[in-house]
Image (cartoon, rainbow, N blue to C red):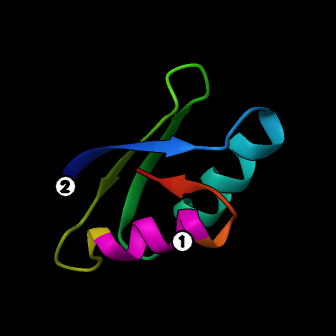
Amino acid sequence: MEKVILNVEGMSCSHCENAVKKAVGGLDGVGEVMVDLKGKTVTVAYDATKLSLDSIKNEIEDQGYDVV
């Protein structure tokens, strides 16, 4: 498993946190998703043989948040 920490703008509440966790956690190859609203980060543990980092970023952006 690889672990990446993404800076994400636009998350401000538990609804935002749950939306990102559900969307990213539903991707094949994701083992763990942690959202830090205060730090504006999303930490993802994933299997790089099954899933690309770009796919994770796109899923977050599809939820309406900006990966910076």
Residue 68 in percent (x, y) is at: 40, 50
Residue 48 is left or right of residue 53, and the answer is: left
Observer-nearest of 25 and 35:
35
Q: Residue at x 17, y 78 (%)?
A: 49
Residue 59 — which label? 1
Q: Could you tell me the amino acid type at mark 2?
A: Met
Mark 1 nearby-residue class (10 Å; few <14, some 14–19, many ≥20): some
Q: Residue at x 79, y 34 (%)?
A: 14
Residue 26: tell me if it is visible. no
Q: How far is disc 1 from disc 2 in space, using C-alphas?
A: 19 Å
By secondary structure, the bulk of the magenta-drawn segment is best described as helix
For disc 2, the marked residue is 1
Which image quarter: residue 48? bottom left
> Considering only vertical position in the picture, is 28 above or below 13?
below
Residue 54 in percent (x, y) is at: 33, 74
Residue 56: tell me if it is visible. yes
Observer-nearest of 52 and 64:
64
> Considering only vertical position in the picture, is 31 above or below 43?
below
> Considering only vertical position in the picture, is 34 above or below 30?
above
Marks 1/2 in contact by CB < 8 Å: the verdict is no
**First-in-chain label (1 vs 2):** 2
The residue range painted magenta reads 54-61
Which image quarter: residue 64? bottom right
> SS for tag 1?
helix
Q: Could you tell me the amino acid type at mark 1?
A: Glu
> SS for tag 2?
loop
Mark 2 nearby-residue class (10 Å; few <14, some 14–19, many ≥20): few
Q: Residue at x 43, y 48 (%)?
A: 32
> Considering only vertical position in the picture, is 65 above or below 23?
above
Quadrant of the image containing the N terminus: bottom left
Q: Residue at x 49, y 22 (%)?
A: 39
Q: Any magenta on residue 38? A: no
